[in-house]
Amino acid sequence: DIYGWFVKQRFKILMEYRVNFLIGAASTIFQQAAVLASIWVIMSQVPTLAGWTLDEVLLVYGLLTLSKSINHMFADNLWTLGWQYIRTGAFDRFLVRPLDPLFHLLADRFCHDGIGNMIVGILLIVRSSVSLGIVWTPFHLFYLVLAVLSGGIIFIALTLLTATSAFWIIDSIPVTQIVFNTHDFAKFPLSIYQ
């Protein structure tokens, strides 16, 4: 349960500045609201986009946001690998401790900003499920959890794959950002694209 200890220590640090904690968690909600407003504008002009309604698009977007929140909360530290750890030499502390270096890097920083993404994702799934009349059987709930966790693991894997380029080029953020931002295409169902 060493990961729980790391998260507990991180929350102690975050609670030193409670307003900053709340602003960080709320900022992602405002960011998501801006994206949702743009989706609403598009869908109000085009009621069905390649056969997809607004509620169906919101369900897809909610699933994406929920999966992305897992990456944001648990693997956000990978983004800073190059400039915060490798360039400064701070990565060596992970190599000399009796913990797996990757585990320690991930556990070193829980990113509370992802909580806002998680809340938005859950609200969108609930709202669109009600509008679409989706009946949540135990199998559907299991599939939902499996899909969200799988999506989160895929996001973490892509971030890890690109962040490790920091060992050669030091600042891996541009590489990670190029690959990571391709998820913007997943905000809409893939069938709308040529």
Image (spheres, helix red, strand yellow):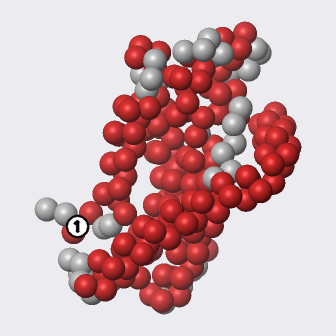
In the rendered structure, the answer to whether residue 6 lies left or right of residue 162 reads right
In the rendered structure, the answer to whether residue 101 lies left or right of residue 127 reads right
Taking the spot 51% from the left edge, 53% from the top edge, the residue there is: 68
Placement of the C terminus among the 4 image quadrants: bottom left
- Expressed as whole percent of the image width and height from the top left, the position of residue 111 reads 66, 45
Residue 144 visible in the picture: no
- Expressed as whole percent of the image width and height from the top left, the position of residue 155 reads 47, 45
- Quarter-of-image position of residue 36: bottom left
How many residues crowd around disc 1 within 10 Å: few (fewer than 14), some, or many (20 or more)?
A: few
Q: Nearer the viewer, residue 32 or 53?
A: 32
Q: Nearer the viewer, residue 86 or 186?
A: 86
- Figure disc tally: 1
- Expressed as whole percent of the image width and height from the top left, the position of residue 191 reads 23, 67
Say what amino acid the circle numbered 1 marks. Ser
Residue 71 visible in the picture: yes
In this view, 51 is above or below 38? below
- Quarter-of-image position of residue 141: bottom right
Q: Nearer the viewer, residue 156 or 150?
A: 156
In the rendered structure, the answer to whether residue 100 lies left or right of residue 155 reads right
- Quarter-of-image position of residue 96: top right
- Identify the secondary structure beneath mark 1: helix
Taking the spot 34% from the left edge, 39% from the top edge, the residue there is: 178
The residue wearing badge 1 is 191
In the rendered structure, the answer to whether residue 160 lies left or right of residue 41 reads right
